[in-house]
Amino acid sequence: MYNVDYAIRGETPEDAELLENLTQIVFGPGMRARAAYVLREGVDHDMDLSFVAERGGQVVGTVRLTRVNWGLEVVLMLGPLAVLPDLKGKGIGKALMQAAVEAASLKCAQGDGQKAIFLVGDLSYYGAFGFQRIAPDRVSLPRPADPMRVLACELEQGALDLLSGPITRFGD
C-alpha cells in the first residue's frame, strides 16, 4: 500500500501554468526536442481526457491526451505523464494512467472518441494498461525515437490492425 494521500481530478484551464512548471521540473529543457512534444505543439489537448493529481492542495502530477493523425486515422497520444520526482513510485502515475485510459475507453464506447492511444514509453510500465509494441514498419514519427518504445493501446478491438503510416500533428 502507498503511504501518500492524493486526489485525481479533471484538468481545468486554470492548471495550465502549474502543469507547464511541473513538466519542466520532471523532463527538463530537453523535452521540447522529443518527437512527442513536436506532435503536441500547437494542438490543444482534450480537456475531457486530461487529469491532474493533487496532494495537500498542490498539483503533483499530470496526464494529457491529445489527438494526432496516424496515417489516415485520428488517434490519441498520451503524454506527458509527469509526477513530481519526490513522489514517484507512490502510485500517482498509475492512478493518472488509469483515469485517462478509462475516460478514453468510455468516450470510444459511446461512439464519440478515438479507437486507440499511442505513446512513446517503457513497455514494462505501460503494458499494465493494455499498451503493446508497434512494429517499426507500421509507424514513423517526426523525430527519432527508440522503436522499442513506440507503444499503442486499443480502445476498440481490432483498432491497431487498421493503423499504419506516419504519426503527424492533428490537423496537418
Image (cartoon, rainbow, N blue to C red):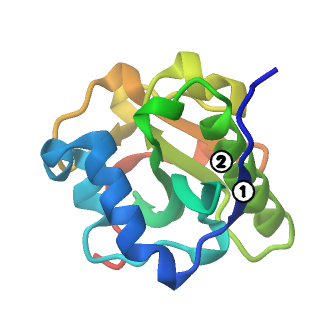
Q: Residue at x 48, y 67 (%)?
A: 67
Q: Quick one: 30 or 106, which is closer to the camera?
A: 30
Bin the neighbour count of mark 2 within 10 Å (Cα to Cα): few under 14, some 14-19, many 20 and up. Answer: many
- The residue type indicated by label 1 comes to Ile
Q: Earlier in the sequence, mark 2 or mark 1?
A: 1
Instruction: Give the quarter of the figure containing the C terminus.
Output: bottom left
Question: How many numbered discs?
Answer: 2
Q: Position of residue 150 (x, y in %)?
A: 41, 32
Which label is found at residue 8?
A: 1
* Residue 73 in view, yes or no: yes
Expressed as whole percent of the image width and height from the top left, the position of residue 152 reads: 55, 39
Q: Is residue 67 left or right of residue 107?
A: left
Element type at mark 2:
helix
- Please name whichever residue, 124 or 156, is drawn nearer the observer in this view of the structure: 124
Residue under pointer 2: 96
Who is closer to the viewer here, 9 or 138? 9
Outermost residue toward the bottom? 13
- For the residues labelled 2 and 1, the Cα–Cα distance comes to 7 Å
The amino acid type, in three-letter code, at marker 2 is Leu
Q: Is residue 86 above or below residue 116?
A: above
x, y (%) of residue 135?
43, 26
**Are dots 2 and 1 in contact, CB under 8 Å?**
yes
Residue that appears at 42% across and 64% down:
68
* 109 shown above or below 55: below
